[in-house]
Image (cartoon, rainbow, N blue to C red):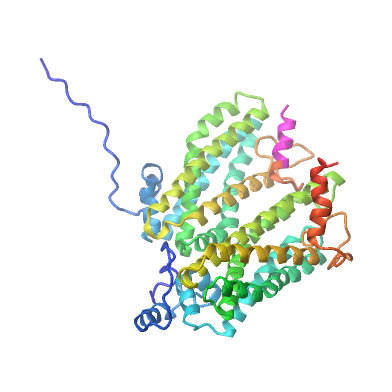
Amino acid sequence: MDGEPGRCGAGVQPRRLTSPGCGSGLDSLERRVRLPSRACGFLPMNYLPFRLLNDRDTFWGLLWSRRLSGSDLLRLMVFIMVACGVYGAIMAGWRSPRLSLYVAIKLPLLFLATTAFVSVFNWMLGLVFRTGLDFRTTIWMVFSAMTLASWILISLAPVSLLFMLSGVPALGTEAELQYAHNGILVTHILVLALSGVSALWVLREGLVRLAAPGCPVGLVLLTWIGMFAFVGCQMGWILRPFVGSPFYPVAFMRPDCLERNFYEFVFGEVMPYLLQGGR
Amino acid sequence: MNEPTEIKPPPVPVFDGSTRPGVMLEALLKAPERVTDAIGKDRASVRTGWFFLIGALLFHAVFGAAMGLFGGAEAGLASAFKAPLVGLFALVLCFPSLYVFSSVGGAPLSLRQTFLTATSCLAMIGLLLVGLAPVAWLFAVSTASLRFMMILVLVAWGIAVWFARRYLNGIRLIPEFQQSGGISCWFLVFVVVSLQMATCLRPMLTAPTPERGWLTSEKKFFMAHFSDCWERGK
């Protein structure tokens, strides 16, 4: 494995790691998680976000054996900030360079703030469901999922850039601008949804590998995702605009951002509108 | 009286395990699983990838010329340049996502494998398109209906894309790449990006007008563009 970073985890079914207290298990794990000394081509495979992308077997092993430090976590955070920043800049680029800069700051903030808000509760849920995960491991798992979501965002940045440069006119009639805004909005929603699904995939993988045998992995995952979605929607609501509407002035945050919440908007305006047939 | 001779089916093509570019290109049609096997087991060289890419661009050019003749010789010439560019740009834009999606999906490709997978996929589309080029040419010179040509080109491209999708699915036969959901997901992205690139490089079927040159600076989503063409073709 040492000579082949990025290959050892390919195609294997998720398997649960045994207790770190077992002597022979620990020995084999030590062999398994040893960091390879050489990089693969010009890609820095030892860089933790790369390892998480290419060799998650080893990554879960490192996490399980507590060989990941605070500075490693910081590396993941920096990666999330850069990747989300780049994608954020593209996301609002069609509207104005100023909004582009704002969203380059706000999108990483949305990811990191949502994680920060839900971490304690997710850890408690883990305790209730007897996952056997401590706070540190829970935090690591959540940031790992966010890192994978960021990988998806950065990899789709060229695609979003194409749609921004070739699909969205900056000028036009009201109907044309509305169509362009809706089109780019749907594009970004699909990209963000895809990144969310990939994060979910990694969270599930992490739980299967690291949680105690017999714990309800599906239920834990469901509650974690529910919590992420609940808080994430509100954070997104507060930090809006992200894509930027052509009918509103460019601003870092809307003046009414704290006046009501996302759910009041959905149940107070969107649902009645839909139930009345759009009248 | 002579006994009737037994009629046997033609032999199944057997490849000698060679990974020479020419053999691999032939294998794309005759035994695509051999190509995926060579890519998955890291036996195919980067040179093969370049060969796939050049082949794909040539095949796209042939199809582009055939369909472009609908708008006259000039349009045919322009489309012969534009069609390969659609494929090439779509491939370049989607290259990072193929690398990332395959890894996230649990079947990590190396950079070389990513390059080979992407170029072989484009070559597969190109091969099918070049097979359909005579049909496209026949209708291009014998119909004046833009709507009909639009449907024909989209159907031809759809058939090629369907075969490319089937080819990519073959990678699941390799034990290390059984979890190929990420690659399937990438393929969807590739299809959407190709459609947007075709919109970006329009017009491809009609000759340029004084108002609209060979390339237009007007920005448009591919669905809006196809809808406009449909209306215009009435």
Q: Position of residue A116 (x, y in %)?
A: 68, 75
| Residues rendered magenta in the picture | B224-234
Asked if residue B14 lies in the magenta stretch, the reply is no
Along the line of sight, the residue nearer the viewer: A242 or A268: A268
- Relative to A140, say whether A168 is above or below: above
Q: Which residue is drawn at 44% across and 46% down?
A: B167
In this rendered view, identify the residue nearer to me: A103 or B17.
Answer: A103
Give left or right: position of A77 versus A173: left
Relative to residue A144, is residue A167 drawn left or right? right
Percent of width and height locating residue B175: 37, 58
Q: Which residue lies at the image location 51% right of the left edge and 45% below the top edge?
A: B58
Q: Can residue A209 be seen in this view?
A: yes
Q: Is residue A173 visible?
A: no
Query: Does residue B230 belong to the magenta stretch?
Result: yes
Q: Quadrant location of residue B68? A: top right
Tell me the residue at 83%/42% (across/down): A276
Instruction: Please tell me whether residue B224 is drawn above or below residue A137 in the rendered image.
Output: above
Tell me the quarter of the image containing the C terminus of chain B: top right
Where B162 sits versus A80, above or below? above
Left or right: A62 in relation to B75: left
Near-viewer residue (A233 or B164):
A233
State the quadrant of the N terminus of chain B.
top left
